[in-house]
Amino acid sequence: MSALRPEARSLPESGIVRALNYGIGRPGLIPLWAGEGDVQTPAFISDAAHRSMQAGETFYTHQRGIPELRETLSAYHRRHYGIGISAEHFFITGSGMQAVQIAMQAVAGSGDEIVIPTPAWPNYAATAHISGTRVIEVPLDFTDDGWTLDIDRLKAACGLKTKAIFINSPANPTGWCATREEVAEIAAFARKRGLWIIADEVYGRYFYEAPLAPSFLEVAEPGDRLLFVDTFSKNWAMTGWRMGWLIAPVELGATIESLIQYNSSGVAVFMQRAGVVALEQGEAFAAEQVARARAGRDLVCGRLAPLNRVHFATPRGAFYLLFSIEGEDDTDALALRLIDEANIGLAPGTAFGSGGERFMRLCFARSRESLDEAMDRLIGWLENN
């Protein structure tokens, strides 16, 4: 171990993975710890990948992504955002996570800083840490009316070494969503300061007040330093496929292509064929996934709201509930206890950085039956502890 780079040695164990490793495989356990639902990839998407493999599309391919998928993504964004973004701006990556990695590798390194509102998905900070980039956390404020971001505090956190502001909205794990005014203000500040914005909007369609959450794509101006991250995982139940995309300025094309080449050497053609079909034929399925998550949110919040010991703000987006339990401050230990004593798997808030320590995260993108049973178990545990 001593021969490894300090950045590798000091990577923290993911609290989500710790809970998962502790409880995975237990008979009857209800797993609400990870960011995925319980619906399999629909057959019309999987069949497209199978047809491609049967046709022999199993060789190396375009590092930026096959032209058909990049064109289809361009059309998809035109339909949903009303914005014309040419195919040259799209880069296919081996997951949304790899899109985050490539974005960070492109703009920040040793001695640089990235500003991130927290609580946040731990992979953001860990990715920056690997490259020697320092993460400046700006904790969101928790109130009964929801999670809020102090924009002035965010601006003040940006110093001489800051290279980028990382915004995940709708946010994992809080469900916080930036308003259109906040998105515009952050974009204008970054533009003025010459900072990059890395916008992770993978939950952009999981917004419970409109068809789409406010997006940096809607306020972007020519020349903006914007890197936009998205994934096939959430909308089309493709978490295990590990395929996402990055939208970036055309001028970065050769650099991003090289970063893809030296990280993964591209995404399998048969997976990309499935992505084309998901985008072209998966609208009804994606809408159903969002409706299912909304129903899950309402069920979980409705069951927990009457409990005096449980505190949370109803999430405006994404598909997680972040809640605290009075008298239970060690959430790492609580996650393991709930596995042992209630047979439900939740993620401890300590995994998500500053502001999340006293909370637990629950993924509600699951069936009504599964969530009802999970709430029965959790409420029963609370009554006895």
Image: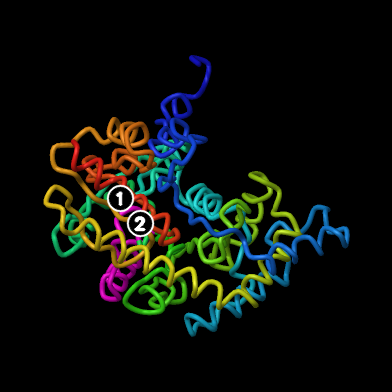
| x then y, percent, for residue 21 | 47, 32
**Residue 376, labelled with which disc?**
1
Rate crowding at label 1 as few (under 14), some (14 to 19) or many (20 or more) other CA atoms within 10 Å: some
Nearer to the camera, 54 or 382: 382
| x then y, percent, for residue 319 | 38, 60
Q: CA distance from mark 2 to mark 1?
A: 6 Å
What residue type is disc 1 on? Asp
Query: In this figure, what is the number of numbered marks?
Result: 2
Q: Is residue 266 left or right of residue 14?
A: right
Q: Quadrant of the C terminus?
A: top left
The answer to whether residue 174 is seen in the rendering is: yes
Q: Where does the magenta region start and end?
A: 171-195
Instruction: Confirm or deny contact between disc 2 and disc 1 (CB under 8 A).
Output: yes
Hey, which quadrant is residue 68 in on the image? Answer: bottom right
What colouring does the structure picture have? rainbow
Q: Is residue 216 shown above or below 83?
A: above
Q: Is residue 123 shown above or below 141?
A: above
Hey, which quadrant is residue 146 in on the image? Answer: bottom left
Q: Secondary structure at mark 1?
A: helix
The answer to whether residue 165 is seen in the rendering is: no
What residue type is disc 2 on? Asp
Residue with the most extreme left position: 308
**Residue 210, labelled with which disc?**
none
Q: Is residue 10 left or right of residue 259?
A: left
Nearer to the camera, 182 or 176: 176
Give me the residue at 75% from left, 65% from top. Answer: 47
Nearer to the camera, 121 or 11: 121
Q: Which residue is mark 2?
A: 372
